[in-house]
Each structure stands twice: as C-alpha cells, then as structure tokens.
C-alpha cells in the first residue's frame, strides 16, 4: 500500500493497486458523511477504439457512455439498483464526463449494506432489448431538457466553434438520432471493452478504518484484468472553427462566453491550472477596478467565471458572464487582459490572489464528496490531487505573466452568445 501525506492540509491518501489492476484510494476523514465513487476511464470522447484482441476498428454512437451509465442500474432480478440504494437511505447517483463515467453514493448510515448492492450492479450489467428500448425515451427527454438549458447551449456552441474534430464538441448525452442506434449488443461491447479493473478506480472518503474498508471492497471485486483497449482520437488542427456563434433562446438576460483554445498540451497542467486560477482572481475578482466599474454602471451583477478545462486531448480557457451589455463587457474584458499584459502584475495583486486561491484549495478538502470527485477527475489525468499543494510553491509572478501572454491569443479566441428571442 502506498501512503501519500500532505502536511499542509494534514490529510493522507492510502492507495492500493490490486492484483487485477483495480486502484482503490482511501482518504479517512472525521466526518459523519461517507462517500464512495467507482469510475471507469470511459467518456463521451471515447467513440472509436480497437477492443481487446480485435483488429477491426469499433465506432460507437455518440452518447453511448451516458446511455450505459443509465442502464447499469438495471438488474436481472427486475430491480433497479438506484431504487434499492435510495430505499435504504443513501443518496446514489451517477454521471458521465468527456473522459470518465462514475457511479457513487453517500450516506451517514447503512454504508456497508449499500456497499453490497453497489459492488454488485457495477460489475454485473444486464441489458435486454426491452430495457434498452425503455430507457431511450427517458434519455430523449433528458437531451431535450439540455437543449433548453441556456448555460449548456452556450458551452456546446463554444466547443463546436473551437474544435473541428475533437470529441469534446460532442454532447455527452448524444442526440436523438445517435442514441437511436444504441442497442444491447453495443452496450455490452463497450462495457466489456472499457469496464475492466486496470481502467477503473474506486475512491472512498469519510470516517473509515482504512484496512477494514479496503478488505470489504476487495472481497467484493470479481472483475478480471484485461489488456488495455486502444483508443483512437481524431487529429485536431490548431485553428479554431469559427470566431463567433450566436443563438436565441427563451432567456431574460444574454449569456456571453469567451473561449481561448490552448494548443500546448505538453505543459504541466497542474502548474498551468494554478496560474490560471491566480490570473482569474487578478483579472476579474470583485476587488478589481474592472469589476467595480462594470458593477457600478449596471453592466454586470456578478464577476466573470473563469474555467480551465483540460484532458490528454484538449485544453481551453472559458470566461462566462451574464449581461445585457454584450459589446461593452466584451471590450472591457479585452481591455483588462491587454492592460495587465502590458503593465504586468503587481506584487500586491499576485500575493493576494495566491493566498485566495490557496484558501479555496484547502476548503475543497472539507467535504468528502468534493474530495472524492476531485481525486477521480485528477486520477484519469495522471495527476495526484495533492500535487496542487506541492506545485503551488513553484508558481511565481513571472510564470503567471507567461501564461497570461501565451494563452490569451486573439487568433485562438472564440465568442459564444445566447440572446433572448426577439419579439
């Protein structure tokens, strides 16, 4: 067993890799809530692959990772494991991202009872023509719901404007047309291709005895190790697809999203992420003159939200704000970025932002659900979550200024806007 300790937040990670390849990570924490998540490194971008021992390329419909997430709860005994877990008082759920699918539950009581059902359904898929077809209408409704969700629309339009071939421009749930092609054979195909121990991780956080919880989990693992599946990703050009995209929806106030495509996939993403969070605070926090001027003039009510998203195949920065003054706010954001580029970052601004960002990292470790979600997301990016605390001391003002100049490039910028429907 590997033990990683972080003295800054006084936490430990216990990591054990089983003989079959499954990694189990335990973070003991004195709290009433207990949380477990079992995740497979299979997401919406993994739609082309060579399955184990096969020479023919498999191409699956968009949205199949999400479809499988829905169907895995169905059991041969006729029960739905989500209902079973809920009936014993635990909050169970699942989610699909671009690079992984996760199944989870949290509770204060009945953890061991829930663990039995949890470990069973993730390892025993049961798909029939009837239950796959029954789910299609439910997922179609979910797709329609997201189609009507303006924050999702502005994001997906941004991805399609930014990326020509990368799977990040595919809606996680797919479309009505793509999910119509999903059947039980395709679901079994991807389960057998991607749901194997050395492509999965289990994370538990809460008031656990480490050795006891490890033994309980290990005793219930029946999946066998497999050769890694060979994924195939489209080659992505450096250029953006289009500069501007706009859509009208039933909203009261427009949403502006500015995106910057980051083609440097080789740089240390932990260091860059820290630098961008510091930059976000320096550029757009509520304490800046930038925000005060826009707020006092009534052009914004909240400061822009910056999000840096990255994986092994893509990387981009997003700036989002809701405003009735799209043009003015866009110009103000551009001017703020250019002014800091030109004049540099003051020591005072750097150290204040650095302190704020560090404090947010520490806060993330106060909640077991945050802890487990962060660990899983980082794991599939080959990152140990404690690396953020270790790398933090290496981030200086010069590095943050370097990232500012390299990332905020006009040629790699896109704008996505959702506006109210014209009457």
Image (cartoon, rainbow, N blue to C red):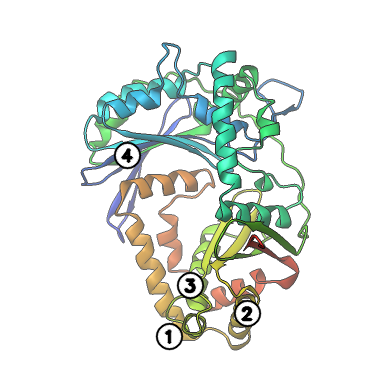
Can I make out residue 118 in this image?
no
On the rendered image, what quadrant is the N terminus found in? Answer: top left
- Horizontal side of 87 relative to 332 (left or right) equals left
Q: Which mark sits nearer the N-terminus, 4 or 2? A: 4
Q: Which residue is mark 1?
A: 348
* Residue topped by disc 2: 328
- In the rendered image, residue 329, in percent from the top left (x then y), is placed at 60, 77
Q: Residues within 10 Å of mark 2 (few under 14, many from 20)?
A: few
- Determine which of the numbered discs, if any, sits on residue 52 in the image: none
| For marks 1 and 3 on the same chain, the one whose residue lies earlier in the sequence | 3
For label 3, the residue is 303
Mark nearest the camera among 4 and 3 is 3
Rendered location of residue 12, percent (x, y): 31, 48
Choose the circle earlier in sequence order: 2 or 1. 2
Label 2 element class: helix
Question: Closer to the observer: label 2 or label 1?
Answer: 2
Q: Residues within 10 Å of mark 4 (few under 14, many from 20)?
A: many
Label 3: element kind: loop
| Residue that mark 4 sits on | 35
Whether residues under marks 3 and 2 lie with C-beta atoms below 8 angstroms apart, the answer is: no
Query: How far separated are the C-alphas under marks 4 and 2?
Result: 45 Å
Kindly identify the residue that appears in the image at 44 percent across and 59 percent down.
388
Looking at the image, residue 224 lies above or below residue 366? above
Which one is nearer the viewer's eye here, 159 or 379?
159
SS of the residue under disc 1: helix
Hey, which quadrant is residue 138 in on the image?
top right
CA separation in Å, label 2 and label 1: 28 Å
């Amino acid at each position: 067993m590997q033990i990683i300790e972080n003295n800054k937040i006084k936490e430990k990670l216990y990591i054990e890799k089983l003989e079959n390849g499954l990694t189990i990570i335990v973070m003991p924490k004195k709290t009433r809530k207990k949380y477990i998540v079992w995740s497979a490194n299979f997401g919406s971008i993994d739609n082309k692959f060579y399955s184990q021992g096969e020479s023919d390329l498999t191409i699956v419909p968009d949205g199949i990772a999400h479809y499988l997430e829905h169907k895995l709860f169905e059991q041969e005994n006729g029960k739905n494991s989500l209902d079973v877990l809920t009936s014993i008082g635990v909050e169970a759920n699942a989610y699909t991202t671009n690079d992984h699918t996760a199944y989870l539950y949290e509770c204060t009581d009945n953890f061991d009872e829930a663990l039995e059902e949890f470990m069973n359904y993730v390892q025993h898929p049961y798909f029939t023509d009837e239950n796959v077809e029954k789910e299609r209408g439910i997922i179609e409704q979910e797709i329609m719901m997201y189609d009507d969700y303006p924050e999702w629309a502005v994001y997906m339009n941004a991805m399609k404007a930014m990326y020509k071939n990368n799977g990040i421009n595919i809606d996680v749930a797919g479309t009505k047309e793509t999910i119509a092609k999903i059947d039980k054979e395709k679901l079994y195909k991807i389960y057998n291709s991607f749901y194997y121990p050395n492509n999965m991780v289990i994370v538990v956080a809460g008031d656990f005895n480490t050795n006891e919880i490890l033994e309980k989990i290990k005793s219930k693992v029946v999946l066998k190790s497999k050769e890694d599946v060979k994924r195939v990703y489209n080659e992505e050009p450096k250029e953006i697809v289009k500069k501007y995209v706009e859509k009208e929806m039933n909203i009261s106030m427009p949403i502006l999203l500015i995106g910057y495509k980051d083609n440097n996939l080789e740089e240390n993403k932990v260091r860059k992420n820290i630098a961008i969070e510091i930059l976000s605070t320096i550029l757009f926090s509520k304490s800046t003159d930038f925000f005060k001027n826009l707020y006092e003039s009534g052009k914004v009510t909240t400061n822009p939200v910056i999000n840096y998203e990255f994986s092994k195949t893509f990387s981009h920065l997003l700036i989002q704000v809701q405003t009735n003054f799209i043009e003015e706010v866009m110009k103000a954001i551009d001017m703020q970025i250019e002014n800091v580029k030109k004049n540099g970052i003051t020591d005072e601004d750097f150290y204040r932002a650095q302190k704020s960002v560090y404090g947010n990292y520490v806060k993330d470790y106060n909640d077991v659900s945050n802890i487990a979600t962060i660990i899983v997301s980082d794991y599939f990016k080959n990152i140990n979550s404690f690396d953020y605390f270790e790398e933090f001391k290496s981030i200086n003002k010069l590095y943050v200024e370097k990232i500012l100049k390299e990332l905020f490039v006009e040629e790699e910028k896109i704008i996505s806007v959702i506006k109210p429907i014209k009457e």
